[in-house]
Image (cartoon, rainbow, N blue to C red):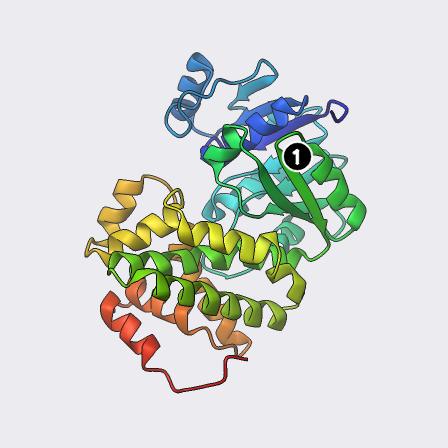
Amino acid sequence: MNSPTTITVLGVGSWGTALALLLARNGHIVRLWGHDPQEVAPLVQERENRRYLPGIPFPATLEMDIDLEAAVAGVDWVLIATPSHAYRVTLQHLHSVLPATVGLAWATKGLEPGSGRFLHEVATEILGEFWPVAVISGPSFAGEVARGLPTAVTVAAHSAEQARRVALLLHGSNVRAYTSTDIIGVELGGAIKNVLAIATGIADGLGFGANARAALITRGLAEMTRLGLAVGGQRETFMGLAGVGDLVLTCTDDQSRNRRFGLAIGRGETAEAAFAAIGQVVEGAATAREALRLARRHAVEMPITEQVDQVLHQGQNPRQAVEILLARDLKSET
């Protein structure tokens, strides 16, 4: 077991709660913070997150807080697990109360809505260039992490030592944490896989079968890698946990809210109805547009991402979107 550390997790959704459970079970002192008192109150009273992770009790070393300044006072690390649309405002509030000695990590997956910026770029803008930061990604459904099922993740930071420090917090009997210094690649993989999960969900919702799903995953990986290399990521990252690992997980299992969203669209439901049924943020819906803007800035072709954007934001018929992909000109796979 690692030596006890005090860690504040920001975000009381399924992922933030799962990470707080993991860290507490690893022997650390954990504070779980949420901004909405009405959302936090049941967690305090019931000592579990019945909305997202029912039946999984909080360890005694997991405390709740709604006061951000109190939540980060005297801690060693802060871990952000909010949706990407709340990432900037969370950092802005955090910056005014966070001591410079506290390390920061995030498990948020996506690009900043509206700007398409990487989350580490947002962190540098708000906190400055020298704040110790790290990103956590990889194939890790919240429910399985919360139940203590075997999981492997990647922790990326600008320095190998910083990545190692965060990995040690997560590493335990049921979680293996690997390290990387490719923040760009790890962040991009975690963002684009959600878009591709929507694509495979749409194809499955249309009844197109396993062949189509395998093709979308494989060609989706090619898209992800092309864009990743263009923006400075490393090829091996996309062949690892934060790339193909997370991609396969999210595209093939219905625990993925992005895949479930795509399934609903493929079956003819409206996006509004699908969002309401899922009841949680579907990161890939916003990321599709931002990823496409990023790809165009770097002159990278992303036909699958483009069709997802067309379906979600331009009124394209899902079946027609697949037909457009199939009608593309013959070309070499490599």
> Which residue appears at 53% of the width and 33% of the height?
145
In the image, residue 192 sits, relative to residue 35, either above or below, namely below
Tell me the element at label 1. Answer: helix
Residue 110 in view here: no
Q: Residue flagged by tag 1: what amino acid is it?
A: Leu
Task: State which quarter of the image contains the C terminus.
Answer: bottom right
Could you say which quadrant of the image residue 321 lies in? Answer: bottom left
| Relative to 219, residue 26 above or below | above
Q: Residue at x 52, y 18 (%)?
A: 58
Estimate the x, y position of residue 139 in percent, counting from the top left.
54, 47
Judge whether residue 251 can be spotted in this image.
yes
Asked if 308 appears above or below 21 in the picture, the reply is: below
Characterize the local packing of mark 1: few (<14), some (14-19) or many (20 or more) Cα atoms within 10 angstroms.
many
Tell which residue pokes out farthest to the right in this image.
161
Query: Which image quarter is the N terminus in?
Result: top right
Residue 117 placement: quadrant: bottom right
Residue 314 position in % (x across, y down): 28, 68
Residue 278, image x, y percentages? 31, 41
Q: Residue at x 33, y 56 (%)?
A: 201
Q: Residue at x 61, y 44 (%)?
A: 153
Circle 1 residue: 170
Tell me residue 113's x, y (percent): 46, 56
